[in-house]
Image (spheres, rainbow, N blue to C red):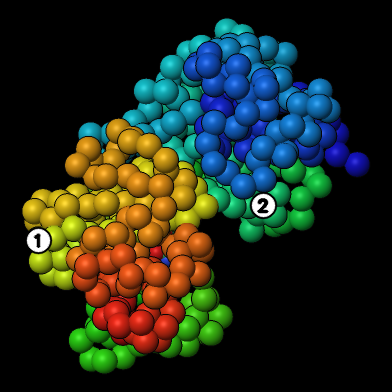
Amino acid sequence: MVRMVHVGVVGAGYVGLTTAACLASLGHDVVCADIDEARVERLRRGDVPFHEPGLTALLSKALASGRLRFVLGAAAAAENRQVVFLCVATPQGDDGNHDLTFIDAATDDIAQALAPNTVVVTKSTVPIGTAQRITQRLGRGDVYVAANPEFLAEGTAVSDFMSPSRIIVGSENRDAAWLVASLYGHISAPVVVTDSASAELIKLASNAFLATKLSFVNTVSAVCEQIGANVNDVAGAMGLDPRIGSRYLHAGPGWGGSCLPKDTRALVHAAAQVGVDFGVVAAAISANDTQLQRIADKIIAAAAGGTVGVWGLTFKANTDDLRDSPSLTIVDRVLASGAAVTAFDPAISAAHPLIPHQVQIVGSALTAATGASCLAVLTEWDDFRWIPPAEVAAVMDGRTVVDGRDLLNAADWSAAGFTVRGIGS
Ligand code: UDX
């Protein structure tokens, strides 16, 4: 039997809202705060402000149970709580480190509202030493601080939260750490209780390791193209070795999103600050840029100054997140070459500040391909797989497809008259 804990969650973004809804569904009493009044109003109505499979259903259940409430402002989520999670944004700072402006502001907002013995917990990815920084900033000898990094990926956030590979809690106070760990009592996963710096490093090192693995396989894909080998066969066989593992071995146009680019730079920066040259991660970052450029070059060559039809703008499928999207970096470079871009993404229906204004957003994959000299598949939305190549051939001017995600059935597309330029074959 898990003891019900009174939890506060500050920040209702991907991590905060998922944490709040999941903890309420695990039986805890949760108050979740945001500083955006419109967002709070929407959430009170059960309206999730971003695309995340399963979250709307979980939110309605949690609201109906009465165990989840939304409030405006961090202080309101801190009063009379036993555990308060800080889930505010930690964007990339100018110096390579995460920018802690929102963490600092939330810390200041809750400092006087916290009841004695409350545990304040970071869940967003933070620089090493943030728990210590919060402890000092709170200036309260009667509350505790812990780091409980979240490993959820967008698109699978709810299942990642409910079935995590591990639960990490770091704190200088072991009772505080175990109280945080106890929140997940119904979940079967290894629990690691450690100090706060180790917990913070576990998160950064995990994301940097995944990024390095991806850059490794993306570079293997470049070698495959030169020697006539097939990266799927190579990576598939590598992944059969349990010491390597099969996940994060799918070659693509480069990695992106709100975490991997930021966390890799933050780890290189954190290591440099203590005199350690983390060259292997720096090389992974630079290899990622090489991969993005390689795909952009293939598209630019095929388009020959004409129009490029782009399928997919989000940084991966099953999200509407455009932050640090490989697709958008590639689109930028294609536009710089003088080609025009018409794009379709199932999750994007209108102009967006992160999408260059020259890109024409259209409402279907076929419309994006219409009149195009080259088609580029840049996000792995499953829908694209099933579009008949003959229908695309009927509307396109050119006959080249750059499949940056190795998504399409190359034999079917070749049979329909296309030259398919994939990744690593
Ligand atoms: C990541 C981590 O996976 C998660 O644990 C952490 O909490 C936040 O950062 P997310 O940003 O949602 O999650 O993205 P992820 O699914 O890891 O993908 C990152 C990038 O790698 C995407 O651009 C994706 O398309 C790319 N990728 C992933 C590949 O190119 N090939 C793969 O095999 C896997």
Q: Which residue is mark 1?
A: 305
Q: Decide if residue 290 is on the left or right side of residue 105.
A: left
Q: Residues within 10 Å of mark 1 (few under 14, many from 20)?
A: some
Secondary structure beneath dot 2 equals helix
Q: In the rendered image, which quarter contains the C terminus?
A: bottom left
Q: Which numbered disc, 2 or 1, marks the residue that appears first in the sequence?
A: 2
Q: In the rendered image, which quarter contains the N terminus?
A: top right
Q: Nearer the viewer, residue 305 or 149?
A: 305
Task: Please name the amino acid that badge 1 sits on.
Answer: Gly
Q: Residue at x 78, y 37 (%)?
A: 25
Task: Please name the amino acid that badge 2 sits on.
Answer: Ser
Secondary structure beneath dot 1 equals loop
Q: Eyeballing the image, is 239 above or below 314? A: below
Residue farthest right in this picture? 1
Where ligand 1 lies, by quadrant?
bottom left
**Contact (CB < 8 A) between labels 2 and 1?**
no
Q: Is residue 8 visible to us here?
A: no
Q: Nearer the viewer, mark 2 or mark 1?
A: 1
Q: Nearer the viewer, residue 14 or 304?
A: 304
Q: Residue 159, labelled with which disc? A: 2
**Cβ of disc 2 within 8 Å of ligand 1?**
no
Q: Residues within 10 Å of mark 2 (few under 14, many from 20)?
A: some
Q: Residue at x 47, y 87 (%)?
A: 237
* Residue 115 occupies quadrant: top right
Q: Nearer the viewer, residue 303 or 75?
A: 303
Q: Decide if residue 228 is on the left or right side of residue 346.
A: left
Q: Residue 349, labelled with which disc? A: none
Q: Residue at x 38, y 59 (%)?
A: 366
